[in-house]
Amino acid sequence: MTVKAHELRELVCFRLNGGLYAVDISMVREIVRLQQMTRVPKSPSHVLGVTNLRGHVIPVVDLRLRLGMAPREHGAQSRILVVELGTDSVGFAVDEVSGIVRLPWDVIDPVKDLGALKGSELMSGVARHGDELICLLNLLESAGESSLLEPLPVVPEWQEVAPSVDPPRARSLKKAA
């Protein structure tokens, strides 16, 4: 497929941690307000849980955490982008949806032009839009062999450690006579 530089690409733009990000509009099925979720035991920290979206249960990923950003409480502007990944629907929680942008292909720099950028496996490019840069995310490719929903290597929060000394003995509650 040959793409002409003047052809427009439609993107859904959203904010995470103040930065501007986007995904191709063809991937987004809908955008909904953040709603009640049920946490799934032993799921990775970036998976917020599952939610019922008009009779369909879908997992919801905190895109902020998935991209290695600091956690933050979701506010009134937070939204869930419901994205089609193959035959599955997955929700991605974002700080705020900015809108739809139509950009010519020639303002989008492919990731390969950016050199060895850490985390570039989640990016398909960077676009110039006014005074801002938009990081284009490729959620479909990033879900390939190592799914967004599969557990990431996790450092255990605690480890059971054998006591180095004998535990203290229980004291009697009786007063000495």
Image (cartoon, grey):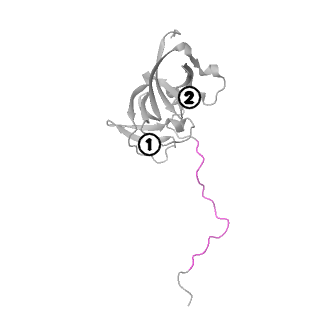
Q: Residue, x 50% and y 31% (percent of image)?
A: 15
Q: From what the image shows, is residue 56 above or below residue 170?
A: above
Q: Is residue 22 left or right of residue 36?
A: right
Which residue lies under the disc numbered 1? 49
Q: From what the image shows, is residue 3 above or below residue 153?
A: above
Disc nearer the start of the sequence (2/1): 1
* Furthest residue in direction bottom, as rendered: 177
Count of marks overlaid on the render? 2
Q: Is residue 164 inside the magenta stretch?
A: yes
Q: Which residues are magenta?
A: 153-171
Instruction: Give the label on residue 21, or none.
Output: none
Decide: few, some or many residues near mark 1? Use Cα within 10 Å; few <14, some 14-19, many ≥20.
many
Query: Residue 104: x and y, percent?
Result: 51, 13
Query: Amino acid under label 2?
Result: Leu
Q: Residue, x 55% and y 35% (percent of image)?
A: 67
Query: Residue 141: x and y, percent?
Result: 52, 26
Query: Amino acid under label 1?
Result: Gly
- Which of the 4 image quadrants contains residue 123? top right
Q: From what the image shows, is residue 177 above or below residue 122?
A: below
Q: Residue, x 42% and y 34% (percent of image)?
A: 80
Which residue lies under the disc numbered 2? 122
* Furthest residue in direction front, as rendered: 131
